[in-house]
Amino acid sequence: MEDSIFSESEDEEENADLPTATSISQTETEYQERADKIYQEYATQYKNRFKWIRPQLFKPSLKKDLRADCLALIEIAKNFSKWETNNDHKLQILIDLLCQTLIQKSQKLQRWSLGSDPPPLKH
């Protein structure tokens, strides 16, 4: 396999210590507390790993829309048994497919930037 600008091993090593979610919170309070904790870690301990976007660049409706999405996820979690993401075979297949697609696209972009492949024509 040829080298990619997105190296899986480098990405895994770089992000190995980032907080991850393994289940969906069951209440809005739990969800908010968890989000606050993760945000604080990202904003302090991992601050230099991200290029932060100024809040003024977002539409005011984004906060309302994101809250509605979170509440919908909480309702889904309440109606189903605890979701063990580590044991979800279909989720792993989806993640693998997305990663494979990203790697293929990055390789194609890399070949194009080196002049090997012409860019695709859009009609």
Image (cartoon, grey):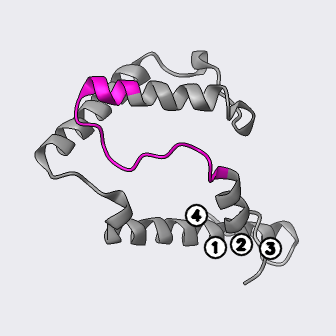
Mark 2, residues whose alpha carbon is within 10 Å: few (<14), some, or many (≥20)? some
Considering the numbered disc 4 on the image, is that residue within a helix, a strand or a loop? Answer: loop
Q: Nearer the viewer, mark 2 or mark 4?
A: 2
Against 44, residue 50 (above or below) is: below
Which residue is pictured at 53% across the width and 22% down the height?
58
**Labels 2 and 4: the sequence-earlier one:** 2
3D distance between C-alphas at marks 2 and 1: 6 Å
Which-is-in-front pick, marks 2 and 1? 1
Q: Label 1, secondary structure: give it.
A: helix
Residue 57, percent from left and from top: 59, 21
Contact flag, marks 2 and 4 (Cβ < 8 Å): no
Q: Tell me what residue is drawn at x 60 percent, y 65 percent.
A: 102
**Horizontal and vertical percent for residue 114?**
88, 70
Residue under label 4 = 123
Marks 3 and 2 close (CB-CB < 8 Å): yes
Name the residue at the left extreme: 79
Label number found at residue 108: 2
* Amino acid under disc 4: His
**Residue, disc 1:** 104
